[in-house]
């Protein structure tokens, strides 16, 4: 994994971090964003990204497509980038379960700063329950936000964050090649 691929933990107000659609802004701007009206729903936001074609195809093949288009939400979607050939060969279970994207959707809207704020002072991590009752643990490791999906223990890191939609937010995850 290349360190430059990951979204870095914002620790200074003047730090530059990649945010929605690769626009670079200071952490202070991310904490207090301007009010922007977005009409695209979560699925519409993901369809335009070629690197999410596998995730979007799985959404469209399940009832999740309708839910993310019609329900008001908010939802947070951790959309998985198309895997590398190595990751794809080792993760057969993803193709066997047509409803696998449900393991990457949680109720509520969680931006990157909100996730970091939810970490305990003792341990830099937090756990969320997905809409299909699976657990996602998020933790900070050397200023990079990592995700561990339970019970499979599949690991991913935050590749791009805070893509806003009318009914929630999308973060892009990249699997860690095992």
Image: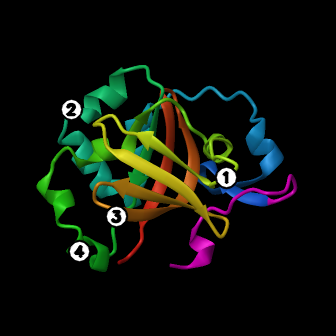
**Foreground: disc 3 or disc 1:** 1
- Mark 3 lies on residue: 82
Label 3 crowd bin: few (<14), some (14–19), many (20+), radius 10 Å: some
The image position of residue 108, as x and y in percent, is 49, 29
Label 3 residue SS: loop
- Mark 1 lies on residue: 122
Closer to the camera in the image, 13 or 116: 116
Of the numbered discs 4 and 2, the one sitting upstream in the chain is: 2
Of the numbered discs 3 and 1, the one sitting upstream in the chain is: 3
Closer to the camera in the image, 41 or 138: 138
Q: Do we see residue 86 in this rendering?
A: yes
The reply to whether discs 2 and 1 touch (Cβ–Cβ < 8 Å) is no
**Which secondary structure dominates the residues rendered in magenta?**
loop
Q: Do we see residue 47 in this rendering?
A: no
> Is residue 70 on the magenta stretch?
no
Residue 63 has which mark? Answer: 2
- Residue 124 falls in which quadrant of the image? bottom right
Of the numbered discs 4 and 1, the one sitting upstream in the chain is: 4
As drawn, 102 above or below 6: above
């Amino acid at each position: 994994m290349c360190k430059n691929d990951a979204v870095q933990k914002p620790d200074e107000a003047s730090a530059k971090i990649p945010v929605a659609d690769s626009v670079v802004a200071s952490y202070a701007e991310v904490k207090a964003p301007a009010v922007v009206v977005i009409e695209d729903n979560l699925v519409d936001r993901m369809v335009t990204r070629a690197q999410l074609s596998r995730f979007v195809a799985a959404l469209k093949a399940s009832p999740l497509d309708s839910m993310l288009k019609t329900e008001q939400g908010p939802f947070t979607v951790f959309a998985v980038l198309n895997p590398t050939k190595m990751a794809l060969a080792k993760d057969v279970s993803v193709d066997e379960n047509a409803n696998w994207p449900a393991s990457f959707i949680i109720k509520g809207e969680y931006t990157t700063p909100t996730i970091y704020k939810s970490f305990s002072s003792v341990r830099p991590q937090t756990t969320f329950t997905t809409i299909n009752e699976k657990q996602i643990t998020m933790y900070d490791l050397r200023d990079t936000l990592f995700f561990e999906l339970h019970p499979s223990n599949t690991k991913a890191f935050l590749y791009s964050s805070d893509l806003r939609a009318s009914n929630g937010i999308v973060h892009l995850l990249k699997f860690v090649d095992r």
